[in-house]
């Protein structure tokens, strides 16, 4: 049972790196691409935002003495590399895909234009948004929440390396408790290391539910979006009542 007609999928750069610490692992990209293709073939309209943490992180570059603004722009370019790699994989799977960037680079991608992006989705194309918001100091999570609102999506899906939101970091705390449902306020006040507060606030203001799931688990995306299975954590107005 398809739960959402139109979604935005946020992918971190780390999931595109697979088992590697740096760069693109095309086995991982192809596996994620096949899941995205299955969701697309089920008739769900898709847009995506990709991070760039597998290339470099602005805050890490800042520690090396590079000015924050310059470091953030460098990070934005990393997201473009990821978007182009993902586009290549999707189109080989028969999924028509367009990359739009917030920083103009017309030889590689379209500039971000909201109406054009909406038209692409209406025509059955997947749109990948890259280069963040085009401005420093904003995370790609905030970019995803912003684009989700602009694209009028029914749900924003955050693909991570864990099964959803826990009350503690499950990789370092064996007693971490899984939280299947949260309200926006609970998610923002809990300071969970899943998304920043600005992203949560944007989704709350626009009443966009957030589904956090493990994108590395084979079949999870299809099970949640196409089969309607309860997978991951849902952040919404209702919380547990949803």
Image (cartoon, helix red, strand yellow):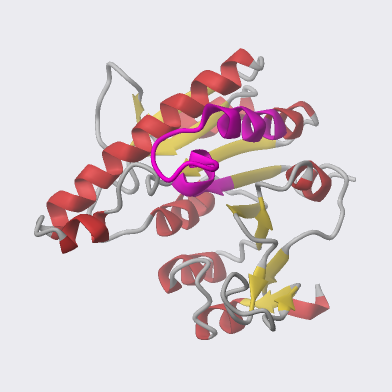
Give x and y (percent) for residue 213.
68, 57
Relative to residue 34, is residue 188 depicted above or below? below
Quadrant of the image containing the N terminus = top right
Q: Residue at x 13, y 50 (%)?
A: 70
Left or right placement of residue 93 versus residue 198 in this view? right
Kindly indicate the quadrant of the structure image that contains residue 45.
top right
Count of numbered circles in the view? 0
Q: Residue at x 53, y 51 (%)?
A: 148
Quadrant of the image containing the C terminus = bottom right
Give x and y (percent) for residue 72.
22, 52
Q: Residue at x 63, y 30 (%)?
A: 33
Magenta stretch: residue 27 in it? yes
Give x and y (percent) for residue 196.
44, 69
Kindly indicate the quadrant of the structure image that contains residue 164.
bottom right
Magenta residue span: 9-36
Left or right placement of residue 180 versus residue 75 in this view? right
| Res 47 seen here | yes
Kindly indicate the quadrant of the structure image that contains residue 93.
top right
Relative to residue 83, is residue 156 depicted above or below? below
Q: Closest to the observer: 184 or 227? A: 227
Give x and y (percent) for residue 23.
39, 36
| Res 119 seen here | no
Q: Residue at x 86, y 51 (%)?
A: 228
Left or right placement of residue 158 versus residue 13 in this view? right
């Amino acid at each position: 049972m398809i739960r959402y007609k139109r979604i935005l999928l946020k992918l971190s750069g780390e999931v595109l790196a697979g088992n590697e610490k740096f760069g693109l692992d095309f086995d991982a990209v192809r596996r994620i691409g096949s899941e995205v293709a299955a969701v697309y073939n089920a008739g769900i309209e898709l847009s995506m935002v990709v991070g760039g943490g597998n290339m470099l992180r602005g805050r890490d570059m800042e520690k090396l003495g590079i000015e924050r603004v310059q470091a953030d722009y460098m990070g934005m370019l990393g997201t473009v590399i990821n978007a182009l790699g993902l586009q290549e994989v999707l189109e080989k799977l028969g999924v028509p895909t367009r990359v739009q960037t917030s920083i103009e680079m017309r030889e590689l991608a379209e500039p971000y234009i909201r109406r054009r992006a909406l038209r692409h989705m209406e025509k059955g194309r997947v749109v990948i948004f890259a280069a963040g918001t085009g401005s420093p100091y904003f995370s790609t999570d905030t970019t995803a929440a912003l684009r989700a609102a602009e694209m009028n999506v029914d749900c924003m899906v955050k693909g991570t390396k864990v099964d959803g939101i826990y009350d503690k970091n499950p990789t370092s705390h064996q007693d971490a408790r899984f939280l299947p449902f949260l309200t926006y306020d609970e998610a923002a006040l809990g300071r969970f290391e899943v998304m920043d507060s600005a992203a949560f606030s944007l989704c709350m203001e626009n009443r966009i539910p957030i589904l956090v799931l493990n994108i590395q688990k084979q079949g999870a995306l299809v099970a949640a979006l196409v089969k309607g299975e309860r997978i991951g954590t849902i952040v919404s107005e209702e919380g547990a009542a949803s």
